Image: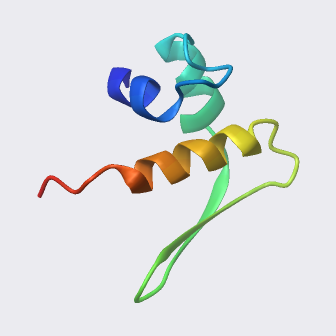
Amino acid sequence: MQAFRQNCLSKTSFAKATVGTIRLSFLKLGARITISCRRILIAIATACPHQDILGIAYSRIQAIPDSG
């Protein structure tokens, strides 16, 4: 969680958020997950209050080099 906050949430309003706040805001988010042969789609509600920050975190996760 510390690495997620440092790498993905830096320069956002959640940069100094506690683990509990991040868990409640992002990890306990209701979403529809669809798995196909080539990709995994995560659909969140259009009323999600943190969509912009989730988009930033997602793009930063993709930019992390694969260690395996």
Q: Position of residue 67 (x, y in %)?
A: 15, 52
Q: Position of residue 33 (x, y in %)?
A: 57, 66
Residue at image location 48% in from the left, 35% down from the top: 8
Q: Position of residue 39 (x, y in %)?
A: 46, 79
In the rendered image, the quadrant that contains the N terminus is top left
Side of 59 relative to 68 (left or right)? right
Side of 16 relative to 2 (left or right)? right
Q: Position of residue 41 (x, y in %)?
A: 57, 71
Q: How is the image coloured?
A: rainbow
Please name whichever residue, 33 or 12, is drawn nearer the observer in this view of the structure: 12
Quarter location, residue 4: top left
Whether residue 57 is situated above or below residue 38 in the rendered picture: above
Residue at image location 65% in from the left, 55% down from the top: 31
Please name whichever residue, 3 or 19, is drawn nearer the observer in this view of the structure: 3
Please name whichever residue, 5 or 63, is drawn nearer the observer in this view of the structure: 63
Please name whichever residue, 54 or 11, is drawn nearer the observer in this view of the structure: 11
Residue at image location 47% in from the left, 15% down from the top: 19
Q: How many marks?
A: 0
Whether residue 24 is situated above or below residue 52 in the rendered picture: above
Whether residue 53 is situated above or below residue 43 in the rendered picture: above
- Residue sticking out furthest to the right: 47
- Residue sticking out furthest to the bottom: 37
In the rendered image, the quadrant that contains the C terminus is bottom left
Residue at image location 56% in from the left, 23% down from the top: 22
Quarter location, residue 26: top right
